[in-house]
Amino acid sequence: MNRIKKRFVFVIFMLLVILQLFFFYMFLQSHLTSGVKVFAAFINNLFSTDNFIVSKLDLNFFDKKLNQNLSGILNEGPNSYIEGIYYSNMSLKYVKKVKDGYLLYEIPERVIKMPQAEEEEFLILFKNEVVYSNNYELIGSKLETKGLFSKSEVTDYGFEVVIRYDLKKVLKYSVYFLLPLLFLYMLLLYVIKFYSEKDEKVCNSINNIVSELKNSYEKLKKRETVQCHCLDTDVPELENLQNTLKLIFDEFSGIIKEYKVTSSSFKKTIKELEETHKLVNERDLQLITALAEAVELKDTVTGNHSKKVVDLSVEIANLLGISDPEEIEAIKYGAILHDIGKIGIPESILNKPSKLTAEEFEIMKKHTIYGEKIIKSIPGWDLVAEIIRHHHENWDGSGYPDGLKGDEISLRAQIISIADVFTALTEDRPYRKALSEEEALEIIRNMVGQKFSEKIYTVFLEALRRFKKRG
């Protein structure tokens, strides 16, 4: 009979071991899953801003800032581990294709650091090569296996992020979790050996305890806080057993609370990053508004001109199917600031009531170069600077300042150009009254093939029709 009892206790012990190991495994997997999603969102958020654009490369990967060809070092999209280019330490590098070249993103190692536990490893991979890790010894090596206790997710930018636990430390913690059960097993053997006469009472008490354990386990699976209640058994040994189990479940409840605190910390970090991104966008908008107001204060004749050009330019861009947010933003900002260079033109020329002399016109033409110089100093605004420089280029090559011809002129600059000309023709100038819409359209039609392409002219007419229809 005692042998049967011992076997029964052993079966119960093994079931509890399996139950505890299963819960421990599920807890780790759940923590890894939520953690890797936060890590991937964190990396995506870093690349979604323009704050880490360090350089604009041409189509041959030539970096004018460094005066160096990077084609043998960098590739389009995510890049493998290489030493920092603009940062002396390790950094994450991504090359984004734009119409007239590439944008080089470089995120230094200090920005990527995440809150972590002692046993956690954070890795960023590209083609199984470690390009970042909080374990510096792994950086630059190939990762053949990720391990049993790991989770990974591919970011929107092609990098694979991985969070994993050190297997040795996981095994150590699992042994710590099993020690109370081993103690429980020895305690049960002791109870059976010395209190065999209480078999029925003990069995009933054990059944009640198992039922309480099951209820507690169901709560744990739902990440609920567990209150393990001790049952009145009138058996001192079982009372001790229940007290031990209560300590175990109290420990698990503490783990769950820590997990919730960690999750809350991750969410708070993501929220702070989103708020920072929002503040950066608001700062850019304030800067644009201030620059536009500066132009209007100096050039009293063309005040409010830029706003009209913006509305018409955005309508043309939509009809041309331009949907890239970066392109739309560049067109909008370029339309607002296309005449920002007039800050450098004397007011006597800007507001001259008669036609400009040849010498004065040469001075006026420099506003495109002045404007580019002002805007190009702002990181990430290269497309806006290009629009400002080329919005007076002509389709036949007769424009200024670079004499570009045909498709050498970006579609962005062509859009701003035709919107600017039409708006200027229908506004009063010191040397003439505003033209009617019909007169302005006749002049623009005669410029097709010389100043404008047939394509941009056709789309402009449709954009103007829709613009008028909306009132």
Image: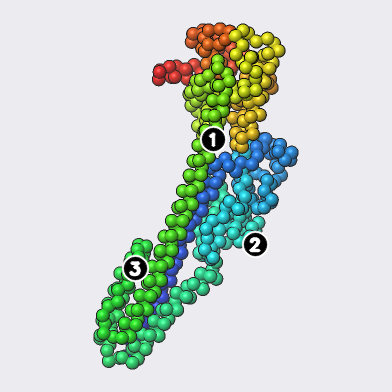
For the residues labelled 1 and 3, the Cα–Cα distance comes to 50 Å
Q: Position of residue 62 (x, y in %)?
A: 70, 38
Q: Secondary structure at mark 1?
A: helix
Q: Could you tell which of marks 1 and 3 lies nearer the N-terminus? A: 3
Which image quadrant: the C terminus? top left
Any mark on residue 394, and which? none
On screen, residue 180 versus residue 205, left or right, reads: right
User: As rendered, which of 46 and 371 lies closer to the eye?
Assistant: 371
Q: Quadrant of residue 407?
A: top right
Q: Quadrant of residue 135?
A: bottom right
Mark seen at residue 137: 2
Q: Which residue is labeled 1 in the image?
A: 284
Horizontally, residue 223 falls left or right of residue 432, namely left
Residue at screen point 51% across, 12% down? 426
Above or below, 46 against 447 in this view is below
For residue 445, say whether it is visible.
Answer: no
User: Which one is nearer the viewer's eye here, 194 or 42?
Assistant: 42
**10 Å neighbourhood of mark 1: few (<14), some, or many (≥20)?**
some
Distance of label 3 from label 2 (alpha carbons): 41 Å
User: Is disc 2 surrounded by few (<14), some (14 to 19) or many (20+) residues within 10 Å?
Assistant: few
Closer to the observer: label 1 or label 2? 1
* Mark 3 residue element: loop
Q: Is residue 231 visible?
A: yes
Looking at the image, is mark 3 or mark 2 earlier in the sequence? 2
Instruction: Judge by depth and name the residue closer to the eye, 82 or 428.
Output: 428
What residue sits 52% from the left and 29% below the top?
Answer: 289
Disc 1/disc 2 C-alpha distance (Å): 40 Å
Residue at the spot 57% in from the left edge and 52% down from the top edge: 112
Q: Amino acid at mark 1?
A: Asp
Q: Amino acid at mark 2?
A: Glu
Q: Which is nearer the N-term, disc 1 or disc 2?
A: 2
